[in-house]
Amino acid sequence: MTIDPYAVLGVPRDATAEAIKAAYRTKAKSQHPDGGGSPEAFQALGLAHHVLSDPDKRRHYDETGSIDDAVDRTRATALQMIHGVLGGLLVMENAAFIDLVQEMRSQIGGQLRDMWDRRAKAERGIARAAALRKRFSAKAGADLIGELIEAEIEGARDGVKQVGAQIEVAEVALQILADANFAVEPMPGYARPTTSIYQSGLGGVLGSSALGGR
């Protein structure tokens, strides 16, 4: 994705960090896909904010006019994933009493597990279809049924690639959250628990060897 981050955010090249943040928040509300915005435009918005909110990346863009697409696009999309989960938590009346970082990890970890399951199921389906393909043949002429199965397999493989990209985004999102902390406010009249109620659900994800290798 090639973009002009300043144009995407609608800010001048000498915009302050505060102005960049304000522009992103304003545009994110109107361009979010849940509100009728385009996913592509929202992704570009996230990438623009990611570049301009990082002094080193902003300086690199100002000097070269280029963006490291492969890394920045995945990170920007991961931040969008976090943003989507965070938005629902911030409006909760008891948000201050919940470890929001752990809750975001738990929710994204659950999404990641679902992605792994979907990919594994699709891969098993591809293997079965490929085995069944060998059983089809034409009595005469082109093997039209076999060609249909091959097209179905190819489409399924494309789907597996897309899920793989989503898995990468979720893993980066968890990496970002691993470096975040939230100061939980003790519930009035209650002692703060020594272990978050959300840790057990997340531990299986963060502690899984599959996070780095699936």
Image (spheres, rainbow, N blue to C red):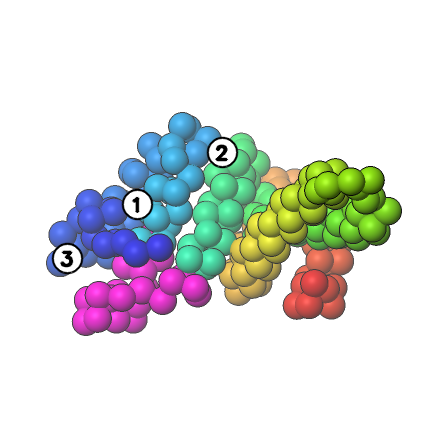
Instruction: Rate crowding at label 1 as few (under 14), some (14 to 19) or many (20 or more) other CA atoms within 10 Å.
Output: many
Q: Which of these two is toward me, 75 or 147? A: 147
Say which quadrant the N terminus sits in.
bottom left
Instruction: Rate crowding at label 3 as few (under 14), some (14 to 19) or many (20 or more) other CA atoms within 10 Å.
Output: few
With respect to residue 57, does 189 lie above or below? above
Is residue 68 highlighted in magenta?
A: yes
Question: Do the residues bearing badges 1 and 2 touch, measured as CB atoms within 8 Å?
Answer: no
Q: Say what amino acid the circle numbered 2 marks.
A: Val
The Cα–Cα distance between marks 1 and 2, rounded to whole angstroms, is 19 Å
Of mark 3 and mark 1, the one earlier in the sequence is: 3
Residue position marked by numbered label 3 in the rendering: 13
Q: Say what amino acid the circle numbered 3 marks.
A: Arg
Q: Secondary structure at mark 1?
A: helix
- What range of the chain is rendered magenta? 49-72
State the image coordinates of residue 130 (x, y, percent, origin top left): 78, 51
Q: Which of these two is toward me, 15 or 112? A: 112
Residue position marked by numbered label 2 in the rendering: 91
Farthest-out residue, front: 140
Which label lies toward us, 2 or 3? Answer: 3
Of mark 2 and mark 3, the one earlier in the sequence is: 3
Say which quadrant the C terminus sits in.
bottom right
Is residue 184 highlighted in magenta?
A: no
Q: Secondary structure at mark 2?
A: loop
Residue position marked by numbered label 1 in the rendering: 24
Q: Is residue 132 left or right of residue 200?
A: right
The Cα–Cα distance between marks 3 and 1, rounded to whole angstroms, is 15 Å
With respect to residue 148, does 169 lie above or below? below
- What residue is at 31 percent from the left and 64 percent from the top? 67
